[in-house]
Image (cartoon, coloured by chain):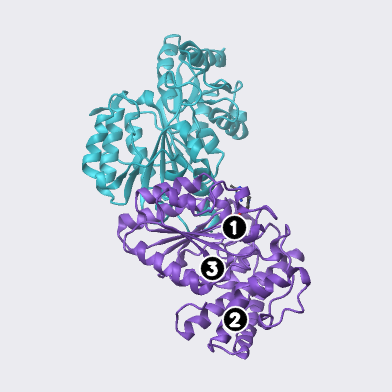
Amino acid sequence: MLPKLPRDNLLELCRRMFVIRHFEESLVPLHDKGVFGGHYHLYIGQEATGVPAISCLRSDDYLFTTHRNHGHLLARGAEPKRLLAEILGRADGLNKGKGGSFHSVAPTLGFLHSSGVVAGIIPLSTGTAYASKALKNGRLTVCLFGDGSLEEGAAPEAFNLASLNKLPVLFLCENNGKYGAGRAVAAGQSSSMAAYPLTDLPKAYKIPAQLIDGIDAGLVHATVSEAVEKIRRGEGPQFIEAQTVRWPGSETNWPSVPHPTDSSLAWDVSGVQEKAREWYRSCDPLLVFARELVEANQATKDDLASMERQVKTEIAAAVEFAVASPYPKPEEAERNFFA
Amino acid sequence: MRELAYYEAKFEALDEIMAADQRVHLINGTFLSLSPHRHVFQNLAKKYGDRMMSPPISELGFCGLATGAAMAGLRPIVDLSTGSFIYEAWPQVANEAANAYSMSGGQTRVPVVFHLFHGLRGGGAAQHSGSPQAMLWNCPGLEIAIPSSPRDVKGLLKTAVASDNPTIFVDHVRLLDLRGEVPENDKPIPFGVADIKRAGSDVTLIATSHTVQVCLKAAEKLAKEGIEVEVVDPRTLVPFDLATILSSVEKTRRVVIADETHQSCGVAAEIAARIAETGFDKLKTRIRRVSTLDVPVPYSPPLEAHIGPSESRIIDAVRASVA
Ligand SMILES: Cc1ncc(C[n+]2csc(CCOP(=O)(O)OP(=O)(O)O)c2C)c(N)n1
Ligand SMILES: [Mg+2]
């Protein structure tokens, strides 16, 4: 369902989902051509979780994210060209090329630190929440992490700390392994987590926890809004597990695009290779959202097509900017690692 | 001049720091560890209870909490008490706190202090006698302060809390009762400034933490044999004051390094390498190390005493150096 928001807001959510999708798809050829090395993780398939969830926040709230951070930064309004420059290791990157895909940050947007260590951010998020509570500034922390994070000991330690101290933090667990197509291919979640459903773990620490469909933008928006309100009222931490179905393009070790996204796919997936067709037909959150907008008369197919054209132009310009951006000077490697 | 016990100087520093800066929070806290002076800490708790947190036994969790709180504007001091317990928190200290400033391109500051008691303490055995500062020195992005006297603990703790970088504050329970001069209204001690704890012309004896005190006693005995030892205490490992050491070496042309970290890749190893690389031509004889032997720390008293940088091992090394 659609979030209960005015039309302009809905269209902006849609635009941000397009930005994420086309940004992410643009990385694959850049990587395959050797424009950048290093592993990278795409947010495709999770847009309807991150975009509506992040839209529920105040501009001064804190966010922590993981190796799969591009979508979160873009959802919050980071400039695609500077994020791309960072991924390419360039001087104009968000972190001046010192972080890369794993560690892109944007402190002005509330992203202080992105960790490539699975679960590394979960204890940190209790810290910003602890500081907000001590400083009484009303700032909330959202910690965005994958289902795999719950397998690390850091997660339960942090849940215990957050619960005991009623810290203002939302743990938003993005489980991109629905139907067992996650880390252990063709295996169920319970093959790697004895605490299953995953919400059992936070519940053991008395943290209210809900399981929702992460493809349903309206449900994500409603659930996160409500959780955020409770946290702001001082009720302590909340946990949400949002389930999505893994994009077939990231089933392989290195991402590959099974079919370039175009909003017309929302109504006709016959051109998509058979293996990936079902995902684009029923599991692609962006296409679901596009269909819902049109069915609810909030946009026409033409509106969406022209929005998508603009986004593609913006991403093409971002690629041009990032590729043209210089590398940092080699000596910079020896500098600026202390404040 | 005023004399204080080490634990009193440390307590006074904490009190002054917390009074002066509302951003300072204590996460976990014994700070005086198992010493008989623990009660002193209760006075702090009475004054600043709202800025003190007693977390569950979750070193990984609460070191991460402190690191995150530092990113968001507080200046937490985390007490790990026994230094070996920092191994439980390694991912947060070595992989998050140490890296955040650099990998954010200089945008995220992490002004957190991790306090720990390192070293041989008498019966600590293998799991409560660790000296993790050498491993942490191998982890760029952390500052490391390591006091050896009442005056230094006060002055260095103030600088550690004022620093915008994550700082490891390496302490030793065997120092707690040591008495020494601590002037009233003493200034903070800047990082990266070594201190000549005893002047001498024959051998440069470099030491850290409690081993500085062992070296000072050894130096008195050696003086009776006519060997004048200069005891140099770097006081911080990061940043490291090589210049003061080299100018001492210029004078003595002989170096012994005594330290409680294990020998391999230990603190003495790194200091020896730096002197050899930049001051080799000044040396009249090879550099000698007196480190903790490369074995897990044994429990039994004579075994524990055997492996550490004891006075007798230090004296032997100095004698060999001038022979
Ligand atoms: C501490 C640690 N162990 C292992 C890895 C290697 N690793 C990178 S991503 C990943 C899977 C994480 O799964 P999940 O948290 O569900 O996130 P997803 O990639 O599915 O978004 C692993 C094991 C790591 N980065 N950090
Ligand atoms: Mg996952």
Q: Which residue is mark 3?
A: A49
Q: Amino acid at mark 2?
A: Ala
Give the secondary structure at mark 1: loop
Q: Chain B, which colour?
A: cyan
Q: Amino acid at mark 3?
A: Thr
Number of residues whose C-alpha sits closer than 10 Å to that of mark 2, classed few (under 14), some (14–19) or many (20 or more) = many
Q: How far from the left and from the top, in percent, is residue A64?
A: 49, 59
Instruction: Identify which residue is drawn at 57% across, 86% down.
Output: A295
A181, B72: nearer the viewer = A181
Please say if A285 is above or below A110.
Answer: below
Asked if the beta carbon under badge 1 is closer than 8 A to the nearest atom of ligand 1, the reply is yes
Q: Are marks 1 and 3 on the same chain?
A: yes
Q: Which residue is mark 1?
A: A67
Q: How far from the left and from the top, in percent, is residue B155?
A: 34, 38
B29, B113: nearer the viewer = B29
The image quadrant that residue A169 belongs to is bottom left
Q: Chain A, which colour?
A: purple
The Cα atoms of the two marked residues, 1 and 2, are separated by: 27 Å
Dot placed on the residue nearer the N-terminal end, 1 or 3? 3
The Cα atoms of the two marked residues, 2 and 3, are separated by: 15 Å
Residue A290, labelled with which disc?
2
The Cα atoms of the two marked residues, 1 and 3, are separated by: 16 Å
Check if mark 2's residue and mark 3's residue have beta carbons within 8 Å. Answer: no
User: Looking at the image, can residue B298 be seen?
Assistant: yes
Q: Amino acid at mark 1?
A: His
